[in-house]
Amino acid sequence: MAVDLLLGLQWGDEGKGKIVDVLTKDYDIIARFQGGPNAGHTLEFDGHKHVLHTIPSGIFHEGTINLVGNGVVIDPVIFKRELDNLAKFNLDIKKSLLISRKAHLILPTHRLLDAASEASKGKAKIGSTLKGIGPTYMDKTGRNGIRVGDLEMDNWQEKYRALADKHEAMIDFYNVDVQYDLADLEAEFFKAVEVLKSLTFIDSEEYLHQAQQNGKTILAEGAQGSLLDIDFGTYPFVTSSNTTAAGACTGLGVAPGKIKEVFGIFKAYTTRVGSGPFPTELFDEAGEIMGRVGNEFGATTGRPRRCGWLDLVALRYAVQVNGVTQLIMMKGDVLSGFDTLKVCTAYNYKGETIQHFPYNIEAENVTPVYTEMKGWQADLTKMTEASQIPQALNDYIDFLEKELEVPIKIVSVGPDRKQTIHR
Ligand code: IMP
């Protein structure tokens, strides 16, 4: 069986958690392949809201296997908190949640290093979620990291000590004011590691290979968004993993030829949290309305998200890099009430009009070229059928499909599972 992929096409927060939850019934296995607790995947059903950070979004479906792949970085402390929040659901976690031995661990000192690095950058800071993501991936590629599989060995604490001591020296080197009590942090960490060790560790690439041989259906769940990809995003204002389709191959051990559908999720407008360029960002009432109506606050950090019009230059780029086969448009309901909507179809770049996403998209280099479209007034949040979609929204969708050359198969009109229109 093939593996399907679901990815965010913008700067994250597109609503991946909700859609994975909606699609889960079609899959035997949901597998996270990159990122870590910098993600906040929100699911709403039966009047309750749940935010997951590391645990895949299929966890609430009975019988679904949820796999944390080798490309993910795990903070045992946050992981334990997620498990504590799930306790009331009486899930059989030992059976339904599997963890790759090759996934790397976020140590308390990784979080401190993240804080020190950001503090040292001053105004040039990345706007990191400060979950230790960058330093952990640095240790992974620097071949110093501690992996989940190490926890099954006797000497892992020696390795831990050597690495934590080195990190402390590095924190000193930054020479910034980062206050901490490592003994306290370590007590919490070692306690959480014991909880992690009670879960099921597997050789996940082998597990997924066997699952494919046995005809199981697999959905790879991306985190963050394509424009935060370490290679293809707006570097250096990116995260430290490959958030694009190729990341699923390296983050799960799935061969490229095995990938079938690539579901690309985007919002009907654009948001970004943290620093970095954002050509269609709005500083006026329209942006304020999107933020307020769309409740645009980070699920992990609570920070307000920057809002702007839909950027088709960036979206086209993400569709290309990922090989998207089906699009899913989120939060169409948030745009209800605007008389006119703008969509960026090209950039004015150093005196030229360009259609592609250039190396440099800072405001001094790029001005968006907009097409204006008629807005819609109807409240979409009660709609469940494609036939109920107002004409102006259908025109908006048709325009995007033509520009992106990929069909929009799902239109989401609210955070609940039920507020989902299939086309
Ligand atoms: P880090 O991955 O926490 O170091 O953050 C790096 C950049 O990616 C910052 O601009 C963050 O705001 C952004 N970022 C990281 N994770 C997410 C996410 O899940 N959603 C949206 N932005 C994110």
Image (cartoon, grey):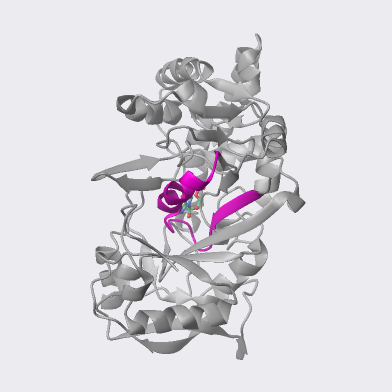
Q: Depth check: 167 or 59 in front?
A: 59
Q: Depth check: 364 or 233 in front?
A: 233
Looking at this view, name the residue that lies furthest to the top. 154
Image location (x, y in percent) of residue 104: 61, 31
Image location (x, y in percent) of residue 381: 26, 65
Q: Residue at x 76, y 52 (%)?
A: 257
Region rendered in magenta: 3-28
Seen in the picture, residue 354 relative to 182 is either above or below; the reply is below
Q: Residue at x 47, y 70 (%)?
A: 278
Q: Depth check: 156 or 41 in front?
A: 41
Q: Is any part of residue 407 visible from this angle?
A: yes
Seen in the picture, residue 114 relative to 342 is either above or below; the reply is above
Q: Is any part of residue 128 visible from this angle?
A: no
Pick the quarter of the image with the N terminus: top right
Image location (x, y in percent) of residue 318: 59, 66
Question: Is residue 377 magenta-colored?
Answer: no
Q: Residue at x 55, y 83 (%)?
A: 347
Q: Residue at x 62, y 32 (%)?
A: 103
Quadrant hosting residue 392: bottom left
Seen in the picture, residue 130 relative to 265 is either above or below; the reply is above
